[in-house]
């Protein structure tokens, strides 16, 4: 916009746009509502040489507006500049890291409370950063999702995890045969060639699909709905199991849950963590376990750290658990050593 004296002029325009957009639109006799997140950058804040720089900063401000909630506006400031720069840096680092093979897969055991033995592993992505050391996925997965890099990374980890699982099956044919769980992001889930890609990975690693479980969050199926059921059915037909990750933190329609071809509900750590101090979380876990039983699914409690939490979960008849109490995520060689030790936790 030309002729802007100060920020208040731009804000007035942003407010007017939002007001206009808040009115319903008619599409085929249906009333439709929409909203906009608006980022504002002023030429006077920084001395810009290029129009792209102004657009970049307005974009950063728009992301801040989105983070504040729906239908908001935000004004660009120098702090955002620093965080926008850090994001750009991280994105460039991630692209470089893919090329330089700096990613590793770590494996966290999932333990049966009935037998005390390992019934599976969850594959978790780690980044061996040349300066920062081992970086946890929580610090880069959200950006990888946003930029779409997660698709490439996701394909890679799926291959690595299937390959590892097949190697363990060959190496330890007489041990209880665990399953491999791999996280599937929303972006990956909506790839048109998802089924083909998974089929291809299974074929090239030689892994029987029955040894693979894919973890998806409630949000992923809620977003896609009917299409999601069709994809899940195709995965089931392939022989792959589906697990709902972080269950209880999203907005699953319980009615629809019944129709989803899933096998496992993973109870989110945020319910498990406070169970020794907060009865409400205990009730929620009890309800999720009852729901899983009723639907013929198994429940895995995530983030078990203490013997107290374990005792409570056992009391609630939770079948399986995962968490630092048993083991942190392990490198491939550490996980191999664990399988070969064949541990029996007396639960
Ligand atoms: P998630 O799928 O819920 O994975 C469990 C996270 O909890 C892991 O964090 C794990 O290290 C951590 N954890 C396990 N036990 C405990 C415990 O007892 N206490 C505590 N405090 N934490 C525990 P991580 O590896 O940092 O992963 C964070 C998230 O990043 C994952 O949450 C998952 O959503 C995502 N992620 C990780 N690897 C991948 C991947 O390969 N693909 C995709 N799409 N997402 C991934
Ligand atoms: Ca997971
Ligand atoms: Ca989880």
Image: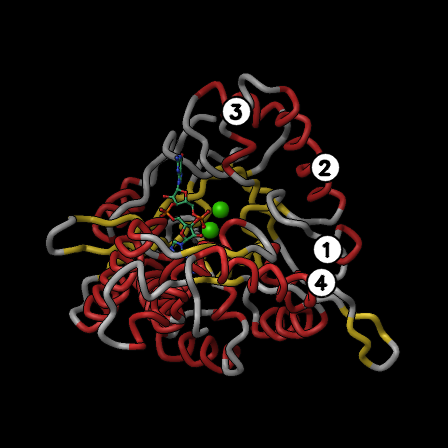
* Number of the front mark, 4 or 1: 4
Residue hosting label 4: 22
Q: Nearer the viewer, mark 4 or mark 2?
A: 4
Which residue is at the far left? 131
Is there a contact, CB below 8 Å, between mark 3 and mark 2? no
Left or right of residue 15, residue 8 in this image: left
Q: Which quadrant is home to the N terminus? A: bottom left
Quarter where residue 40 is shown: bottom left
Question: What residue appears at the point 49 percent right and 39 percent down from the top-left corner?
Answer: 302
- Mark 1: few, some, or many residues within 10 Å (few <14, many ≥20)? some
- Residue pictured at 11% horizontal, 56% vertical: 130
Is disc 3 surrounded by few (<14), some (14 to 19) or many (20+) residues within 10 Å? some
| SS for callout 4 | helix
Q: Residue furthest right?
A: 29
For disc 3, the marked residue is 274
Q: Secondary structure at mark 3?
A: loop
Tags 4 and 2 in contact by the CB under 8 Å rule? Answer: no
Return the mark for residue 290: 2
In the image, is residue 185 above or below residue 248?
below
Colour setup of the view:
secondary structure
- Tell me if residue 110 can be seen: yes
Closer to the N terminus: mark 3 or mark 4?
A: 4
């Amino acid at each position: 916009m030309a002729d802007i004296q100060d920020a208040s002029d731009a804000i007035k325009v942003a407010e007017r746009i939002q007001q206009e957009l808040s009115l319903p639109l008619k599409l085929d006799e249906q009333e439709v509502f929409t909203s906009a997140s608006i980022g504002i950058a002023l030429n006077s804040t920084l001395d810009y040489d290029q129009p792209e720089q102004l657009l970049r900063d307005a974009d950063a401000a728009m992301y801040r507006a989105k983070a504040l909630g729906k239908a908001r506006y935000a004004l660009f400031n120098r702090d955002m500049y620093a965080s926008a720069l850090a994001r750009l840096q991280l994105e460039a680092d991630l692209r470089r890291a893919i090329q330089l093979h700096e990613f590793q897969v770590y494996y966290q055991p999932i333990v049966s409370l009935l037998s005390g033995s390992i019934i599976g592993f969850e594959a978790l992505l780690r980044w061996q950063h040349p300066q920062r050391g081992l970086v946890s996925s929580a610090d880069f997965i959200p950006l990888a999702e946003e930029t779409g890099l997660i698709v490439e990374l996701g394909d890679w980890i799926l291959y690595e995890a299937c390959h590892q699982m097949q190697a363990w099956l060959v190496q330890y044919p007489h041990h209880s045969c665990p399953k491999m769980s791999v996280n599937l992001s929303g972006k990956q889930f909506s790839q048109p060639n998802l089924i083909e890609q998974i089929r291809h990975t299974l074929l090239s690693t030689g892994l029987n699909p029955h040894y693979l479980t894919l973890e998806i969050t409630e949000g992923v199926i809620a977003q896609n709905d009917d299409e999601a059921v069709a994809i899940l059915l195709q995965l089931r037909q392939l022989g792959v199991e589906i697990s709902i990750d972080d269950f209880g933190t999203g907005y699953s329609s319980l009615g629809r849950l019944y129709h989803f071809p899933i096998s496992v509900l993973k109870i989110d750590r945020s319910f498990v963590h406070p169970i020794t101090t907060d009865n409400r979380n205990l009730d929620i876990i009890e309800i999720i376990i009852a729901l899983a039983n009723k639907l013929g699914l198994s429940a895995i409690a995530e983030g078990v750290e203490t013997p107290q939490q374990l005792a409570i979960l056992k009391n609630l008849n939770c079948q399986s658990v995962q968490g630092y109490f048993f083991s942190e995520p392990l490198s491939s060689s550490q996980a191999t050593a664990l399988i070969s030790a064949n541990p029996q936790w007396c639960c």
